[in-house]
Amino acid sequence: MRYDAIVIGAGHNGLVCAAYLGRAGRRVLVLEAAEAPGGLAADREFIPGFHASIAHSLSHFSAKVATDLKLGTHGFGELKQRLPTVGLRLGGEHLVLEGDALAGVGADDATAYGDHQKRMRRFAAALDPFWFKTMPRIGSAKPADVRTFAHLGLNLRRMGKDDMREFLRVAPLPIRDLMDEHFADGALKAVLSWDALIGAKLAPRSPNGAVLAMLYRMAEASRGMHSIPLGSVPSLIESLRRSAAAFGAEIRCAAEVSRILVEGGANDLAAKGVQLADGERLDADCVVSATDPKRTFLDLVGVRFLDIGFTNRIRRLRCDGYVAKLHLALDGLPEFDGLERPRGRLIAAPDMDAIEFAFDDAKHGGLPARPVLEMVVPSLEDASLAPPGRQVLSAHVLYVPYRLQGGWTDAARERMRERAIDAIAQYAPRIRDQIIHSEFLTPADLEREHRVTGGHWHHVEFALDQLLMMRPTYEAAQYSTPIPGLHLCGAGCHPGGDLTGAPGHNAAQEILQ
């Protein structure tokens, strides 16, 4: 059988792209190397009866995608209950962010927070439409590309002169400079900067895209607030799988692609299909890769089919992950000093220096002496994740280097896990007595298990030179590639990673045009 499109990878972007193509009447095959779809958002039973996923919450998944693909009819519930964000303090006097409300800081910071949020939301709203548009090619004079640039300019102009000037000033700033301008409370600055930094090789003093990352995560109606849906994050994957299947897409798991088949002469090369690891050949009019750009071009295509300049740009893409994952199976509700119930996103980062120092350790290939963390207890929102009376704690641990000096050994992994648990125990002193089982996954583990280069959330670093019309690099920044018939739809495309569905949506629109 010949397909109109073969999609490599059944992560959420691959499923979104396949569903849109199927909805348009295309014959689509999705190939996934793992035993189940989902990628970093897949269900993970890390000990019998206890479930988690690497991506442990949703913040800015697209309402448009959910509506277009009828995800509600496939089991994905509306995200009404937003999680508070709690900045943990030693001694229990925590700060709490919930919508527009801020508790646990002084009056001056509370007033500054309201003003700051209003301004940042105006900036985020001006950028919102462009996360779901193809960014024009550099130098393009196509009418559609000119309209996109004009639309962006008009949105910025509509903010008014003062806000437009302020946006252009703060967009390239290190997030520390922005926080120091407006706030005095160290824990508040750490919490507000968190979504500008997590998932990237960025520290508070890094002048390379942190503010844009924050605005990206303030997209959609949630404006950056997180949720855990019924069925946890894997329920989104299951609804996408059902949607794609309902639109006619065929989904095959345990089907690893070993090669993208590029055929033709020197002047008419094109992607003609894929070859599986077991040798099976599958033909298609186009191939769409939801895997990361390095794996796509260097491993699956092969450099002999690529221009040397393009190959060198792909090799230089920065994609080393800096976030590890800790899962704890607990015999009961974790007891955090000062919290009646540990509901919400719990940020263990006392100030911005703590974040910077952890980054300094990792950037030289070492383990952070005092890691900073984001924790949730997802079983509070979905009791099916743990046996009755038991709980799951899920933590993102920053900064844990993909390239550790001396390499990742069992001893190094154990040492880092113990440091992460020690960091939690500062705020929940009984946590060690409650642990039934723990799992610690480094970026290298994520790379091995999920076939994503460097174990990087975004596939490619979220940085100014790897964003917008430069993501992942020119000649591959509009979801097409130098190989006719080969397209990209993963997190390495515009706008970037996180569970949004935007790259899959945008790629499908380009293919259908």
Image (tube, rainbow, N blue to C red):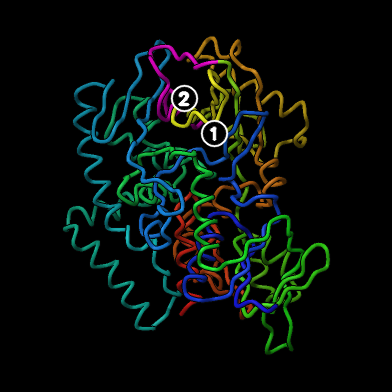
- Residue at 44% from the left image edge and 43% from the top image edge: 58
Above or below residue 181? Residue 162 is below
Q: Is residue 394 shown in magenta?
A: no
The residue pinned by badge 2 equals 348
Q: Quadrant of the N terminus?
A: bottom right
- Would you say residue 350 sits in the magenta stretch? yes
Query: Residue 284: x percent and y percent?
Result: 66, 77
Q: Secondary structure at mark 1?
A: strand
- Prevailing secondary structure class for the magenta stretch in the rendered image: loop
Q: Nearer the viewer, residue 346 or 112?
A: 346
Task: Tell me residue 265's x, y (percent).
Answer: 74, 89
Residue kind at label 2, given as amino acid type: Ala
Of labels 1 and 2, the one closer to you:
1
Locate residue 440: give its quadrant: top right
Query: Which contiguous range is marked in magenta?
Result: 332-356
Residue for badge 1:
396
